Image: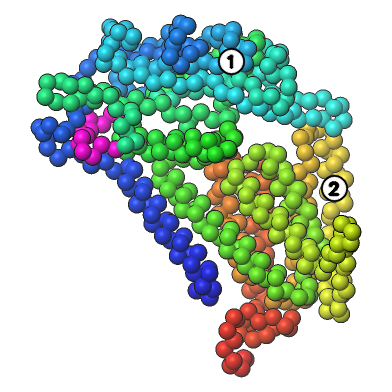
Amino acid sequence: MFLKTSFTSLIVGVFVVYVLHTCWVMYGIVYTKPCDNPRGDKCITPFLAANPKLQLSIYTSLQSNAEGGHTLIHKEEDFDVDSKFERIVNVSLPKKTRNNGTLYALIFVHQAGVSPWQDPRQVHSVVQLTTYMVPKPPEISLISGEDQTQPAAGTGAKGGAASSPDHPVSHWRSRLTLNIVGDHFLFDRDYLPSDVHRYLRVFQNGKKMVYLPLLFVDELSNRVKDLVEINSTSTELPLTISYDSISLGRLRFWIHMQDAVFSLQQFGFTEKDADEIKGIFVDTNLYFLALTFFVAAFHLLFDFLAFKNDISFWKQKKSMVGMSSKAVLWRCFSTIVIFLYLFDEQTSLLVLIPAGIGSIIEVWKVKKAFKIQVFWKGGKPTFLFGKLDESERRTEEYDTLAMKYLSYLLYPLCIGGAVYALIFLRYKSCINWVYAFGFLFMLPQLFVNYKLKSVAHLPWKAFMYKAFNTFIDDVFAFIITMPTSHRLACFRDDVVFLIYLYQRWLYPVDRTRVNEYGISYDEKPKGKPHKE
């Protein structure tokens, strides 16, 4: 399938090289060359190897450098690096933080019994406990007009900072995840990884170089779903402090992933876009994460090949024989509405970009299906529709008949669902109807195939790529955060594609000869007569 088109072969080749290169880069991230000679001068030994008594202290401050004062919120006096724990502490919010301000956490790991501000062998990290984000829009009842807004932290009363729904307000990060490398790893000074270098603090102990504990604050665990809106009445909020030791390889992996998410935000990705990427890394283990990478890579490849073959099929298509024009028209409308909905919901770009490209292709398909010609006269467009031949009119009759049968199911569902939603549900949009009717309007094409007893008119190469992507979407439905309606639509498409595949088996196509619609699928006809 791939070798028939040189351009396709080139794309697949680039894809394979990209996957192999990524595997090599990932290996370089998780593997660190240790020091071969522990007694040599080039080795940097761990401070934890001497089993020192340590203490963990966490402070809050309005400034990242603790100027203007700081407040101790938690301390672990007998801090064991290898012991996992989780604590919930209540943090008092200063007035400036409540008035749409910020608050920082200063985390210290230092020698027990010594103040972290006076300990020369302490390690510390600073992290922001607040972030700015636009509040979620309210869901409105269609009858009463009442909205159901997400209550802000505190008593639920709205503060002055949150008066505008489009104005970013301060949100509380309710989780603080800390990690320290528990491995007593010997670094080689000549092969010190650049990503670990900025976390490494060393001191001279005689002739040996010793590095202090590698403290890492996992900001990937800060998800949008855990954020709590702050207003002027929020005087105290809970903070979950989690700690666990990690390996050096996992530390380097998290550093690279955290830097990647930060880089995406610098390129214009919103907090919600970054949150989708965080969810992939945080909510899955490393083995499943590797599988996710390969799944995502194949998804992008099949997306490209599906778009390419779909465009090629419709570009060469001169007749709408066997094709449901009403299904093409509705698919165009529903695809555009769904794209606008995904854009409004700030869905992950992994979902949004293919949906946008698909919308453009569907508009072009409508132009081809209805044989629309556009003429410009004096700056105003004039649309001219082509005429149908006898075979196309017969297909149109089947299409109209399918819509007639479909209306017996469509109208009761529409009326009953509208009454139920009007009374019991709150909505931000009518997108659920578009998803549901998008499923129903996929059925006329199946009916046309049944009446014609043929599937030779369908773009099967593009269909197969889309089928692969449909099953890949089933995996992504559990990994990537997306609206529930779009998640259900992924499984909805599975049913339709299975029926298409059954019709493909029921009405076989001989690809070695020109079919009844004047279409030849082989790019290079073999010239041999068909053997019965």
Mark 1–mark 2 distance (CA, rounded to whole Å): 48 Å
Residue 169: horizontal and vertical position, in percent? 64, 21
Which residue is identified by label 1?
101
Residue 499: horizontal and vertical position, in percent? 67, 64
Left or right position of 90 against 412: left
Residue 391: horizontal and vertical position, in percent? 83, 79
Callout 2, which amino acid? Cys
- The residue sitting at 52% across, 39% down in the picture is 264
Left or right position of 34 against 106: left
What is the magenta range?
181-193
Give the quarter of the figure containing the C terminus: bottom right
Callout 1, which amino acid? Gly
- The residue sitting at 51% across, 28% down in the picture is 222
Of the image marks 1 and 2, the number of the one nearer the N terminus: 1
Assess disc 1: are there few (<14), some (14-19) or many (≥20) residues with their C-alpha within 10 Å of its C-alpha.
Answer: many
Q: Nearer the viewer, residue 147 or 69?
A: 69
Left or right position of 18 against 408: left
**Residue 466, image quadrant:** bottom right
Q: Nearer the viewer, residue 3 or 80?
A: 3
Which residue is identified by label 2?
414
State the SS at label 2.
helix
Image: 298 above or below 65 = below
Q: Residue furthest bottom?
A: 529
State the SS at label 1.
loop
Q: Which mark is residue 278?
A: none
**Residue 443, image quadrant:** bottom right
Residue 412: horizontal and vertical position, in percent? 87, 50
- The residue sitting at 60% across, 42% down in the picture is 348
Residue 191 part of the magenta segment: yes
Left or right position of 213 against 240: left
